[in-house]
C-alpha cells in the first residue's frame, strides 16, 4: 500500500475510522504511516492555497488527534480542525494502536517522530550512500535531544532491480531514467501532465543531471546482481537500518519486474534472514 497518508488531505475523524477499519479487516496488520506531502501540484488540487513548506503543521496536529480518537471520546479545538466530542468506531485491533511511522527528511521531522514514539522511514532519492548517512545522523541527533524516548525502527526505501544479465540491467536503468524525468516534472510543479501522465523532462537539461547518470544510478540504487544487492543491503544494515522498503514502481515491463522480485525473494532475502 501507500507509505503514508498526507495529513492535510484528511479530517481526523474520517482518518481515524478508516485506519481502524483497515486494521480490523487485516486482522491487526496495519502499519500506519503519516507525512506532510511533497508535491505542490497535489496541494494545489487537494488543499488549494496551502504551501508544501507549511504542510508539516497539519501532520503535527493530526497525530495527537488520531491517538485520542482511537482511545475513546475526544473533543478537538485546534488550528486546522475543530469538532465536538467524538470517537473512532471501530477501534484498532492492535493495542493501543497500530505501529506509527513518519516519513522524515528534515531535522524537525526526526524530532517530531522521536517525541511522538513514531518509527522513521526515509528515502535518499537517487543520491549516494552519504544521503542515508545524513538521515541516520539526524536520527541520532534527535535521540540525543530526547534521551528518554524509545529508539524507533529506522526504515529506508530505494528503487530496486535485481538482474543477472546486461539486457535486464539496461531495461532497469532506462525505465528508472524515464520515471525520474516524470518525477522531476511533478516535483518542480511544471504543469505538463496530460490525462494523469506527467511529461518526461529531458534529464540532460537539469542542473542536477549527474544524479541520473546510468552508472551512478546503478551504483546508488539497489540495482545489481543478487550478490551485489546483498552487499548493498548489508552496508545499510551496518549503518543502522532496521527495515528495507523495496521501491518497485518505476515503469519496468511486468515480466522484468517479476523476475527482479523473484530474484530478490529467492536469492537476496535468505542471505539476510
Image: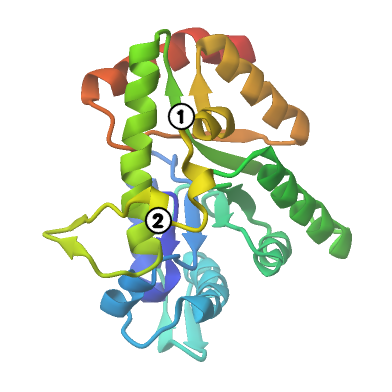
Residue 12 in view, yes or no:
yes
Q: Is residue 88 left or right of residue 113?
A: left
Q: How far apart, in angstroms, are the residues tagged by discs 2 and 1?
A: 25 Å
Q: Is residue 175 above or below residue 48?
A: above
Q: Looking at the image, which residue is at 20% across and 62% down?
A: 193
Residue at label 2?
205
Q: Secondary structure at mark 2?
A: helix
Where in the figure is residue 107, as x and y percent of width and height? 71, 65
Residue at label 1?
160
Q: Looking at the image, which residue is at 86% across and 59% down?
A: 148
Label count reads: 2
Foreground pick, 168 / 234: 168
**Residue contact between numbered discs 2 and 1, judged by CB atoms under 8 Å:** no
For marks 2 and 1 on the same chain, the one whose residue lies earlier in the sequence:
1
Q: Is residue 143 above or below residue 219?
A: below
Where in the figure is residue 238, as x and y percent of width and height? 76, 28
Residue 5: which numbered mark, if any?
none
- Tell me where residue 7 sits by quadrant: bottom left
Amino acid at each position: 500500500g501507500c507509505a503514508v497518508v498526507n495529513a492535510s488531505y484528511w479530517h481526523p475523524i474520517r482518518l481515524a475510522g478508516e485506519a481502524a477499519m483497515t486494521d480490523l479487516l487485516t486482522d491487526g496488520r496495519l502499519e500506519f504511516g503519516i507525512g506532510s506531502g511533497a508535491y505542490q501540484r497535489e496541494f494545489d488540487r487537494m488543499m488549494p492555497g496551502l504551501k508544501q513548506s507549511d504542510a508539516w503543521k497539519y501532520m503535527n496536529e493530526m497525530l495527537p488527534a488520531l491517538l485520542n480518537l482511537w482511545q475513546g471520546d475526544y473533543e478537538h479545538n485546534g488550528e486546522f480542525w475543530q469538532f465536538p466530542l467524538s470517537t473512532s468506531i471501530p477501534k484498532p485491533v492492535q493495542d493501543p494502536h497500530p505501529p506509527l511511522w513518519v516519513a522524515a527528511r528534515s531535522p524537525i521531522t526526526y524530532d517530531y517522530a522521536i517525541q511522538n514514539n513514531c518509527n522513521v522511514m526515509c528515502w535518499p532519492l537517487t543520491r549516494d550512500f552519504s544521503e542515508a548517512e545524513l538521515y541516520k545522523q539526524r536520527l541520532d541527533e534527535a535521540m540525543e535531544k530526547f534521551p528518554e524516548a524509545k529508539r524507533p525502527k529506522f526504515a529506508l526505501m530505494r528503487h530496486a532491480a535485481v538482474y543477472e544479465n546486461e539486457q535486464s540491467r539496461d531495461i532497469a536503468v532506462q525505465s528508472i531514467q524515464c520515471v525520474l524525468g516524470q518525477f522531476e516534472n511533478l516535483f518542480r510543479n511544471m504543469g505538463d501532465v496530460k490525462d494523469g501522465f506527467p511529461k518526461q523532462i529531458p534529464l540532460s537539461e537539469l542542473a542536477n543531471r549527474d544524479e541520473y547518470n546510468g552508472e551512478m544510478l546503478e551504483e546508488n540504487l539497489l540495482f545489481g546482481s543478487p550478490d551485489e544487492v546483498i552487499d548493498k543491503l548489508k552496508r545499510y544494515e551496518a549503518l543502522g537500518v532496521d527495515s528495507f522498503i523495496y521501491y518497485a514502481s518505476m515503469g519496468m515491463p511486468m515480466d522484468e519486474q517479476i523476475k527482479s522480485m523473484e530474484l530478490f525473494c529467492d536469492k537476496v532475502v535468505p542471505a539476510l534472514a
